[in-house]
């Protein structure tokens, strides 16, 4: 059984709470009611001219509304297949028990009644009971002064008297100094971590130990790691479900997992000494971590957004059935000489190996508590990014990218993979299976430490789109509006106090308190409405999100007459033309040139090094992996999964009054490139970030300066409130101030590459728009082809947004005109992983 935890908080998982298997093969199910944004199959070469005329006519139309998708059909199919498998099990041959997946003597009989492929599909995805989880999570450490007769007694589920503390909500991002010392001052999101681990007082050492060991799974990363040479841990990830006494094929080092994929394997713990070793706890977890390193200030920001514990693979009183359909006898010896399971007395025998089987399933999304701002895009799993160069004393900092392969690793299974993904050395998003043996500190038996820790890195790329279409403008306005309102209220209260109106101050504070009690958070209703409904299902559809007019991008150029017209200007002077007739060439411009494009709903394909692509081709997947992919893919229509292969650009030229009939602008060159932005902050980013606020340095600087201005105003008011002994916190949401600080701390780093083959499919002549306006208007349509070059060394990860790190892309089109003028257009685009194998 597995327990899903996110942000170090004890909470229930969003994964369905019933036994599930990977979805069976289903045909691709389209949606009859869906309307296509663009159907290339219905467009032929004979109708190219018609196509461009339609583009001009539908300038202000974005397309039909998208239908919503209900992803629950995947879980219904899983349930149906589960019942089918159950019906195939003959109860007579297995002692009238339909489910006996482990620790039974009749192993051979079960294997005869179940096909091996069927067994591999059998995965229990059931959450443990609350008391069962607490019995392991809150286990009392085995210390030297414990009563030997009581220290290994199984838990009493009916008379439990342990304290029940819920972790208060903390900040989202822990800040820890970069050093070889253990992380002891971290304050993690949504849990209260240890500020230090100190020697307990001699008056009540057991009580103190129990206090700081409460919720051990969440806090195990705060314990000191002594990395003892007496114990060895090895983690092995397999292609299929590992079975006792059978050879199993190991997974490739280049394996990429996606949403809903299942990770099978086993872990071996070995006592390398000639004497018995005691331990207190053994945890096996699947974790996802975001890390930002600030080398200048010698700090790092860490957020553990995913933590899943396999309780059957961890130590527990007695035995817990594995999540997979694995049958074996506890403490029996397998073909490799390993003892299956741990002894109940938590002792590792001399020169002995112990094996535990594990199963993890990547969730489709994280718990809502992952993001305190309730941003749905922050609850989607991000892709693996970069390599954590600080973790494990800089163990992975030596990984270099091979220029021929476009990736690099340490040369063994479980090593993280480094690619040219624009992460640099300071950003990383990593996934890994972590095994920890926890015991008493050798020099202080009242303290716990990590005796041995081993990690197996996994590469994860989420399925489908990672973000919907949206604009950040409304959320930014809302953030500043709330800050202005809070400042206004605080200033009003300060004036009332200075005027000596104490009764009015009390009445004002009471009214303010009532307002705060009736308001859950400071976000506007429009934002809440979109957060809960528009894209909470998985996978993400091409939702039209944000402002209704956020469907196209446009740039305007004040176009000056072409240089080749200078001869006519000279002749105009010779013939004494009036100044009014030639004023268009005095720098004021000859007209306005508008360049625009619709924001594409289709996306560019995820691109990885060629060897990674070959390793993860569809025909290389296991049966369970293939069924998971087919279940994900069939939830979207074929039209929904179309690649962005072409891009249409519209040019509109409006001559000035004195230049009617002039020759329209001539395009000399068009260059297409891709721009990627890394957006980071040491504090949780409160809003979704769209590319329209990143393309302009002026707009971005205004956001940061405005946030800093509001924060400074708050600090000035805070000093004034202290002088008159008033509490300013009554007028400000503490999270609002943190959000402003986060916006001030935003760091934007752009990268530009040229991944496309330069190609123009079609280009129309300048034609009159024939509109009803009184002025002349000329239109030109250009269609560009977007095909990747074959020799791209960069890895183009899907778009993603998290609380600390986000990745945004734009297609940048540079225009150069014959008169020497230039203009550029940034078009937001999404990169996604569908069936691009």
Image: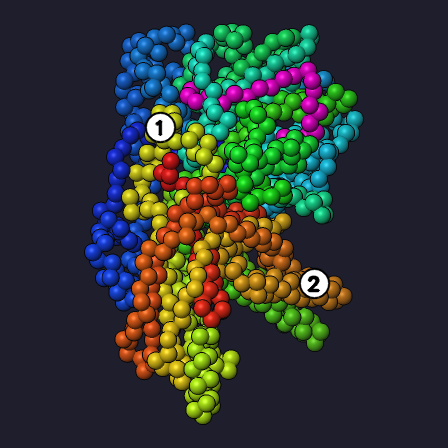
| Residue located 30% across and 32% down the image | 77
Question: What distance separates the C-alpha of mark 1 from that of mark 2?
Answer: 61 Å
User: Residue 698's spot in the image, x, y percent?
Assistant: 57, 65
User: Residue 391's spot in the image, x, y percent?
Assistant: 64, 34
| Residue 239 sits inside the magenta stretch | yes
| Residue located 66% across and 12% down the image | 272
User: Residue 117's spot in the image, x, y percent?
Assistant: 34, 19
Please, what secondary structure does the residue beneath circle 2 have? helix
Please state which of residues 244 and 414 is positioned toward the viewer in this rendering: 414
For the residue carrying disc 2, how many other residues have a C-alpha within 10 Å: few (<14), some (14-19), or many (20+)? Answer: few
Please state which of residues 836 and 369 is positioned toward the viewer in this rendering: 836
Residue with the mark numbered 2: 715
The answer to whether residue 15 is left or right of residue 386 is: left
Where on the picture, by quarter, is residue 262? top left
Where on the picture, by quarter, is residue 818? bottom left
Where on the picture, by quarter, is residue 233? top right
Q: Range of the magenta residues?
A: 220-241
Above/below status of 262 relative to 374:
above
Residue with the mark numbered 1: 619
| Residue located 43% across and 34% down the image | 613
User: Residue 618's spot in the image, x, y percent?
Assistant: 36, 31
Point out the image quarter for the C terminus. top left
């Amino acid at each position: 059984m597995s327990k899903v935890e996110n942000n170090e908080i004890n909470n229930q998982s969003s994964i369905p709470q019933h036994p599930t298997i990977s979805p069976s093969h289903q045909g691709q199910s389209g949606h009859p009611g869906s309307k296509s944004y663009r159907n290339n199959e219905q467009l032929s070469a004979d109708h190219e001219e018609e196509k461009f005329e339609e583009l001009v006519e539908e300038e202000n139309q974005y397309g039909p509304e998208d239908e919503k998708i209900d992803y629950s059909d995947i879980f219904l199919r899983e349930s149906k297949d589960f019942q089918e498998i159950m019906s195939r099990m003959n109860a007579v041959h297995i002692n009238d028990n339909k489910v006996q997946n482990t620790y039974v003597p009749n192993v051979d009989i079960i294997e005869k009644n179940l096909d091996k492929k069927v067994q591999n599909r059998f995965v229990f995805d059931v959450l443990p009971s609350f008391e069962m989880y607490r019995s392991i999570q809150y286990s009392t450490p085995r210390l030297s002064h414990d009563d030997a007769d009581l220290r290994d007694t199984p838990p009493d589920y009916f008379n439990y008297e342990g304290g029940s503390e819920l972790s208060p909500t903390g900040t989202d991002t822990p800040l820890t100094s970069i050093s070889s010392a253990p992380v002891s001052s971290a304050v993690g999101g949504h849990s209260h971590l240890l500020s230090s681990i100190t020697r307990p007082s001699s008056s009540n050492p057991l009580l103190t130990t129990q206090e700081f060991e409460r919720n051990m799974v969440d806090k195990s990363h705060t314990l000191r790691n002594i990395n003892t040479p007496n114990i060895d841990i090895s983690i092995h990830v397999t292609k299929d479900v590992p079975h006792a006494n059978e050879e199993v094929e190991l997974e490739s080092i280049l394996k990429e997992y996606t949403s809903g994929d299942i990770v099978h394997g086993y872990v071996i713990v070995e006592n390398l000494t000639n004497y018995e070793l005691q331990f207190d706890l053994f945890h096996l977890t699947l974790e996802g971590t975001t890390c930002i390193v600030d080398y200048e200030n010698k700090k790092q920001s860490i957020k553990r957004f995913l933590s899943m514990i396999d309780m059957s693979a961890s130590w527990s009183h007695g035995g817990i059935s594995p999540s997979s359909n694995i049958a074996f006898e506890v403490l029996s010896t397998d073909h490799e000489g390993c003892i299956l399971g741990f002894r109940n007395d938590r002792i590792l025998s001399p020169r002995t190996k112990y094996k535990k089987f594990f199963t993890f399933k990547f969730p489709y999304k994280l718990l809502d508590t992952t993001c305190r701002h309730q941003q749905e895009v922050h609850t989607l799993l991000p892709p693996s990014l970069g390599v954590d160069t600080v973790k494990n004393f800089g163990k992975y900092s030596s990984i270099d990218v091979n220029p021929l392969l476009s990736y690099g690793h340490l040369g063994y299974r479980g090593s993280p993979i480094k690619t040219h993904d624009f992460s640099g050395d300071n950003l990383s998003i990593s996934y890994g299976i972590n095994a920890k043996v926890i015991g008493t500190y050798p020099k202080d038996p009242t303290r716990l430490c990590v005796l041995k820790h081993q990690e197996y890195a996994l590469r994860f790329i989420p399925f489908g789109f990672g973000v919907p279409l949206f604009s950040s403008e409304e959320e930014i306005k809302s953030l500043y509006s709330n800050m202005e309102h809070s400042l206004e209220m605080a200033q009003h209260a300060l004036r009332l106090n200075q005027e000596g109106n104490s009764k009015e101050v009390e009445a004002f504070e009471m009214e303010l308190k009532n307002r705060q009690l009736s308001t859950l958070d400071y976000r506007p209703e429009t934002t809440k409405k979109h957060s809960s409904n528009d894209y909470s299902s998985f996978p993400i559809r091409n939702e039209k999100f944000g402002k209704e007019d956020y469907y196209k991008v446009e740039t305007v150029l004040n176009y000056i007459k072409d240089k080749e017209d200078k001869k006519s200007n000279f002749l105009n002077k010779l013939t004494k033309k009036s100044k009014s007739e030639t004023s268009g060439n005095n720098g004021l411009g000859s007209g306005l040139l508008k360049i625009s494009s619709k924001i594409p709903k289709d996306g560019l394909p995820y691109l990885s090094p060629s060897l990674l692509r070959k390793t993860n081709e569809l025909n290389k997947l296991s049966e369970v992996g293939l069924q998971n992919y087919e279940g994900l893919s069939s939830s979207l229509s074929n039209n929904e999964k179309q690649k962005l292969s072409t891009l249409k650009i519209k040019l509109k030229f409006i001559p000035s009054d004195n230049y009617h009939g002039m020759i329209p602008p001539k395009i000399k060159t068009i260059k297409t490139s891709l721009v990627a932005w890394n957006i980071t902050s040491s504090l949780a980013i409160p809003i979704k970030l769209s590319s329209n606020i990143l393309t302009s340095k002026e707009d971005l600087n205004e956001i940061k300066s405005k946030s800093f201005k509001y924060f400074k105003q708050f600090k000035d008011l805070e000093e004034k409130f202290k002088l008159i002994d008033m509490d300013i916190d009554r007028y400000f949401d503490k999270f609002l101030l943190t959000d402003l600080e986060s916006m001030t701390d935003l760091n934007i780093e752009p990268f530009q590459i040229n991944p496309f083959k330069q190609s123009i499919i079609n280009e129309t002549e300048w034609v009159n728009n024939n509109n009803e306006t009184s002025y002349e208007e000329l239109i030109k349509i250009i269609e560009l082809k977007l095909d990747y070059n074959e020799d791209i060394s960069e890895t183009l990860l899907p778009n993603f947004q998290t609380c600390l790190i986000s990745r945004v892309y734009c297609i940048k089109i540079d225009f150069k005109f014959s008169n020497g003028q230039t203009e550029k257009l940034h078009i937001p685009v999404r990169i996604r992983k569908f069936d691009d194998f």
